[in-house]
Image (spheres, helix red, strand yellow):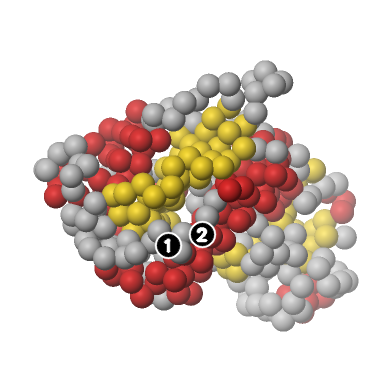
Amino acid sequence: MSGNQNYINHVALVLDASSSMSHLSGKVVEVADQQIAYLARRSQELDQETRVTVYVFADKAECVIYDKDVLRMPSLKELYRPGGMTALLAATLKSQRELAQTAQLYGDHSFLTFVLTDGQENASHRCPDAPSKDPRELVRAVGTMMETQADNWTLAVLVPDQMGKREAMQCGFPKDNIAIWDATSTQGLEEAGQVILKATENFMVGRSKGIRGSRAVFSTGGETVNKDTIAAAGLAPVDPSHYHLIPVAREAAIREWVVESGHTYRTGCAFYQLSKSEKIQAQKQIAVLEKKTDQVYTGPQARALLGLPNSEVRVKPDHNDDFTIFVQSTSVNRKLVPRTRLLVMA
């Protein structure tokens, strides 16, 4: 990229506005507005131009904001009115087809789309925008579109359950670009907003390192955490004499296990292995361990590597053959999980 070319991000929200979303409509607006405020702040901090597009869909898909400068975005309050069925595939196709007509001159352009739905596809075959009336043809069309998108396109979807995840995978969404959210409560939608925030942070930090798109936006797996991304993020290897790795043989409180293993406990010195879905607070440090060598990498960039925002967020560990994530604990009573390891910083 030549020096005078700037990073231009085209971020789209494709929001389910079917009748079943009515009880969440206020929260949808709040979460979308928060996302836009966050994008505006990070665009300025990272010196990236960000343009936002918003689609809402029920019986048909409608573009309510198109490629607008994130610093000039209105609230979605007047633009989101639920009612109707769920034309999910038609909305996905329309959003990507129309965004593909955006000029990509003079800059490093990248496209990131989040589709949020609380139910299964049931109306695209009747949608005026759909390229076919045959539901199977529509599934194929989405798969073909995703296979042929260039490397600067990222398309992610949030679905309400395992069945929705299976359907999304059948349509060709990459497994790590599908997240499940709890569509029954405002709390669930709040958490979905955090998942989108974390994925967006991953995307924008990746952009500043020259990464153009991702097939693993909701992942701590090998595509997100590997030798190249660790080096690109600028994580520092820790001198092996400055830490100890202790096997956890039984369920025990973290301070008790550190002391029992012959080490001095100081608040914040111990990092537990991320082995199940956890809420990680804004102040918690992250360390990454290379399994083959037991080399630990850490630094403030470790949070950015995982796309952790400056707020509490839920993170789940994904299978990663080469690296393990460790999270700082500031609680003396935190229960350790047997057959994991504990990292103690000297």
In the shown orientation, is residue 48 left or right of residue 319?
right
> Image point 45% across, 74% down: which residue?
186
Nearest the eye: 243 or 160: 160
Q: Estimate the x, y position of residue 293 in percent, counting from the top left.
A: 70, 43
Considering every residue shown, the one lying at the far left of the view is: 134
For residue 45, above or below residue 309: above
Q: Residues within 10 Å of mark 2 (few under 14, many from 20)?
A: some
For residue 233, above or below residue 162: above
Q: Estimate the x, y position of residue 56 in percent, counting from the top left.
A: 35, 54
In the shown orientation, is residue 59 left or right of residue 104?
left
Where, by quadrant of the figure, is residue 257 drawn? bottom right
Q: Estimate the x, y position of residue 130 in percent, counting from the top left.
A: 20, 42
Residue 75's disc is: 2
Labels 1 & 2 near each other (Cβ < 8 A): yes
> Image point 39% across, 29% down: which residue?
101
Report the quarter where the C terminus lies: bottom right
Residue 78's disc is: 1
> Image point 61% across, 47% down: which residue?
71
Q: Estimate the x, y position of residue 34 in percent, counting from the top left.
A: 57, 61
In the shown orientation, is residue 237 left or right of residue 33?
right
In the shown orientation, is residue 334 left or right of residue 80?
right
Amino acid type of the residue tagged 2 in the rendering: Ser
Under tag 2, what secondary structure?
loop
Q: Is residue 262 visible?
A: no
Under tag 1, what secondary structure?
loop
> Image point 87% across, 51% down: which residue?
241
Nearest the eye: 13 or 284: 13
Residue 2's disc is: none
Considering every residue shown, the one lying at the far top of the view is: 2
Where, by quadrant of the figure, is residue 18 drawn? bottom left
Amino acid type of the residue tagged 1 in the rendering: Glu
Nearest the eye: 26 or 178: 26
